[in-house]
Structures are given as structure tokens and as C-alpha cells.
């Protein structure tokens, strides 16, 4: 199961536009706090911390982002980055980058927390109208921003950046199937991952797969096949996972994209460690990522074939 994909919320897209409908929901809501892109967790535990109205009523609750309803609980998000001078009121909690806990966070909670993080990031990076430059304000329970210029009044909605991520594979003349992985110099030592890149305007997903692999590693591919998608709001991406067959095997790395790329067999990958391990040994990408999902899926295919 892919982490961050199990969002359980009824978004109430119609009702949330009614301020009167929101009043009671706010006072009895569960609040997700975001502080500089970090979510609130119970201290020293990978358990999401939700707080009630009493804990947040001194914040800007009127502009809390409505996330949705699950099991009769209404969830809201508040970015407290600029308002939280002291964290003593949350002494039993701590703000953590959710990726540090990754796949061990409850799947429903993980999806709610990254939704809150993504929307809060969008709000703080879209404070001014893209058409006229005037300040805009939160609207529609946090799912839009409206320009305050009466001559403009442009509505802006959250955007997601589509990115393809692909596992490229090829059966070599020795009969062994291998996949193409690369690494960036900024990653932890020894980590290799699948190739990925953003989709260009006017480009199909399949064309993006072929272009990105060629640009990053100089490898030509064919038959790109969609596998799964994963929201990745770090800060605002949707990862679209593919597998593709290689038509060529010689690697020519674009140093602006990757530091190196290599072909690995399934048996070799089974000996890899994990992203968060120390040491100089080779490592797989983080367990909460679609990159790891694609690699694990490929390894599991035809397990009897090495």
C-alpha cells in the first residue's frame, strides 16, 4: 500500500462554502497544526496529534482550512508558523517533518497530515494575486484565495505539479533482468532511486517518461505502463508511477540531473539497505515513497526468475 493515498475525508465541497455551516464545525473540530511545513505529533511517537478548539481559539481560527469529515469528526488545518512564538502549550507534542516517520504513520492520519501541509504551503506562497499583484485572502474555507482588488477579484485555487517517476528495466544478453536507478549527490550516501521529472506543458505522461529518462540517463525507452500514483505535497507534487522497457542500455548521465546511474539486478537490490541507515553500503529509497513501491513491485514480479 502506498503511503499518503488513504485519505478518508468527506470534503463537503458544497457545504464548506457556507460560513454558517462552518461555525459549529469549527467549535467542535479536530485541528491539524502546521509549523514551517512540519506536522504536530505526540512527543517521541509516530502518532499524529490533533488538538481541539480550546487549544487553538487564540489563533486565526476563522481562516482555518476545512479539510473534511471522517467518522463524525470535522478536521481543520491551521498554519501556526508566524503565530507560535512559544511551544510550551504543546509540551507533550512536537512538530516533525512527517517523512521522518514515513510509512509507520497510520495511513489515514498520514493522508490527512500531508493534505494539511500541502494546503498550508500553498496559502503562504500565494499571498498576492498572480494577475494584478494585490494581496489576496483565503476563501471557500481555505480552498481558494480571492484578490482584494475590486477591479480584479480573481479567484486562485490550489495547484498540483504532475511528475512522472519510472522504473526502467531490460533483460540483458546474460538472461538477467536489471533496472535503471540513479542518485543525486545531495542524497544520503549510497542511496539509489528510480528516475523522475516534471511533466512539461502540452506533454503527455508517456512522452514525459521517455523524455526524462533520455535527458537524465541517455537511455531510450518504450512501452511506458502506468502503475500507480501518489500525492507528494513536499511541497506540491503528484507522482505518477510508470514502468518502461529500455531500448538501449548505454548510460550517459546529465550531471545537472544525476551524479550517476547504474543497472541493478533483483538479486543485487535484495542486498540493499534502507534510506535512513548509516554506512557506506548501497540503499533503497525511503519506504513511504512511490519510488520504493515501484522497486518492490518489480522485485516481486516473477520471483523465481533471478
Image (tube, rainbow, N blue to C red):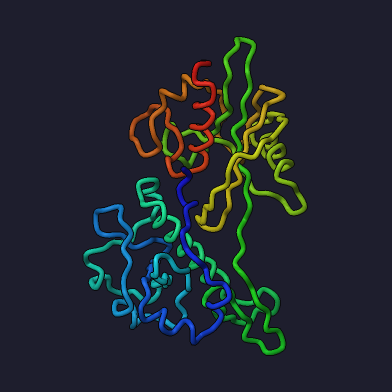
Q: State the residue lying farthest toward the right.
A: 202
Q: Residue furthest front?
A: 71
Q: Where is 19 relative to 249, above or below? A: below
The correct choice, above or below, for 198 with respect to 244 in the image is below
Question: Which corner quadrant of the image does residue 44 belong to?
Answer: bottom left
User: Residue 36 occupies which quadrant of the picture?
Assistant: bottom left
In this view, the residue in front, 159 or 86, is 159
Pick the front one: 298 or 194 = 298
Q: Residue at x 31, y 74 (%)?
A: 52
Extreme-bottom residue of the structure? 150
Task: Residue 115: give x, y in percent of width and height.
Answer: 48, 61
In the image: residue 255, left or right of residue 277 = right
Q: Position of residue 10 (x, y in %)?
A: 50, 66
Lateral position of residue 93 relative to residue 224, left or right: left
Quadrant in the picture for residue 263? top right
Q: Residue 255: percent from the left, percent from the top?
A: 61, 36
Q: Residue at x 37, y 61 (%)?
A: 39
Frontmost residue, 138 versus 252:
138
Amino acid at each position: 500500500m502506498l503511503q499518503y493515498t488513504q485519505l478518508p475525508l468527506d470534503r463537503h465541497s458544497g457545504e464548506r462554502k457556507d460560513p454558517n455551516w462552518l461555525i459549529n464545525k469549527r467549535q467542535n473540530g479536530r485541528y491539524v497544526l502546521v509549523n514551517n511545513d512540519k506536522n504536530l505529533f505526540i512527543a517521541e511517537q509516530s502518532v499524529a496529534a490533533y488538538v481541539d478548539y480550546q487549544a487553538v481559539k487564540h489563533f486565526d481560527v476563522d481562516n482555518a482550512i476545512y479539510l473534511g469529515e471522517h467518522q463524525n469528526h470535522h478536521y481543520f488545518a491551521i498554519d501556526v508558523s508566524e503565530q507560535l512564538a512559544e511551544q510550551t502549550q504543546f509540551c507533550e507534542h512536537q512538530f516533525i517533518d512527517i517523512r521522518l516517520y514515513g510509512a509507520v504513520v497510520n495511513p489515514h492520519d498520514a493522508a490527512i497530515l500531508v493534505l494539511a501541509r500541502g494546503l498550508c504551503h500553498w496559502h503562504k506562497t500565494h499571498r498576492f494575486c498572480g494577475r494584478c499583484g494585490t494581496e489576496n485572502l483565503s476563501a471557500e474555507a481555505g480552498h481558494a484565495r480571492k484578490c482584494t482588488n475590486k477591479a480584479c477579484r480573481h479567484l486562485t485555487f490550489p495547484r498540483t505539479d504532475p511528475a512522472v517517476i519510472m522504473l526502467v528495466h531490460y533483460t540483458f544478453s546474460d538472461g538477467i533482468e536489471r533496472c535503471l536507478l540513479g542518485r543525486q549527490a545531495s542524497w544520503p550516501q549510497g542511496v539509489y532511486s528510480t528516475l523522475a521529472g516534471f511533466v512539461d506543458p502540452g506533454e503527455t505522461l508517456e512522452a514525459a517518461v521517455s523524455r526524462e529518462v533520455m535527458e537524465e540517463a541517455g537511455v531510450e525507452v518504450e512501452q511506458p505502463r502506468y502503475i500507480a500514483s501518489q500525492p507528494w505535497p513536499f511541497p506540491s507534487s503528484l507522482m505518477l508511477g510508470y514502468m518502461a522497457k529500455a531500448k538501449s542500455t548505454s548510460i550517459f548521465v546529465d550531471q545537472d540531473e544525476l551524479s550517476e546511474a547504474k543497472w541493478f539486478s533483483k538479486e543485487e537490490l535484495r542486498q540493499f539497505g534502507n534510506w535512513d541507515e548509516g554506512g557506506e553500503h548501497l540503499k533503497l529509497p525511503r519506504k513511504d515513497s512511490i519510488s520504493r513501491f515501484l522497486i518492490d513491485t518489480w522485485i516481486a514480479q516473477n520471483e523465481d526468475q533471478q
